[in-house]
Image (tube, rainbow, N blue to C red):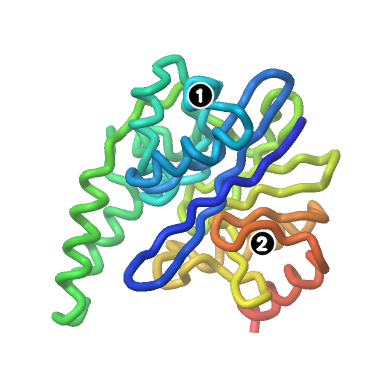
Amino acid sequence: MELFVLKIEKKQEGKMTSLFPVLLKIDNLYFLVDCGYEDDYTTIETELSTYGLTIKDLTGVIITHDDIDHLGSLKLIKDANPNLQVYCGQHEQDSVAGLVKSERLVQAEQSLDSMPEEYKPWALSFIEQLKNIKRVKVDKTLADGDSFENEITIVHTPGHTAGHISLFHAESKTLIAGDAIVFENGAFDIANPAFTLDIEATLKSVKKIKALAPLTIICYHGGIVNVDVDNKLAGLIEKYSS
């Protein structure tokens, strides 16, 4: 297996942000892990082209969880490559496909009543964006402990959302974390705690990740971390355990 980290860089709300989807090459198959916002589609095309690939070369897209910055461009990718297989965790199949509301949309709608008036315009705009996500039928679901293409182990890492999954390559001890963990200012942290649905579950997921003893963690927000990983995980656990 080969693994390549893509980079989507853009300005949001006046500051530069980066997202790090991952491209997996397993034999002659290519799988993209997460795919950015809808308007990141052309950046994904450009990033794939650096490896001599196009959208049509993708075998599948794996969605770590149902959030706008992880599946926003999925419909455009599927339209460009109708044979593409769509994968996600077993708990989020219906929301990814648009059969039920996503957890994030439910959370955003429920927060309106207790939100200060000055924040409501932003919240209403965000809710509209979530409602406008173009949904795609899921072809295969992934459960905790599943083996993906005999190379990757699926790790259920709930907390940020209840159905969040991460991917672990045991041979290289590399974990693709999605939003189970972010890397900011030289340290691991929880992804946007205000939007994390269950902090206690997230902490348990971090402990589960630490037990795998990864040497490298690829954070969707933060990129590749391969120095002092175990101690950084311990620091994150201590931060939210005190």
Left or right: residue 72 compared with residue 161: left
**Residue pushed farthest top?**
83
Which is more toward the observer, 10 or 72?
10
The amino acid type of the residue labelled 1 equals Lys
Residue drawn at the location 54% of the way across and 21% of the way down: 57
Residue drawn at the location 34% of the way across and 29% of the way down: 136
Dot 2 lies on which element?
helix
The spot of residue 64 in percent (x, y) is 52, 44
- From what the image shows, is residue 121 above or below residue 58? below
The spot of residue 9 in percent (x, y) is 48, 57
Tell which circle, 1 or 2, labels the residue nearer the N-terminal end: 1
The spot of residue 76 in percent (x, y) is 34, 31
Disc ID at residue 140:
1
Dot 1 lies on which element?
strand
- From what the image shows, is residue 72 above or below residue 60? below
**Residue pushed farthest bottom?**
242
Which is more toward the observer, 97 or 132?
132
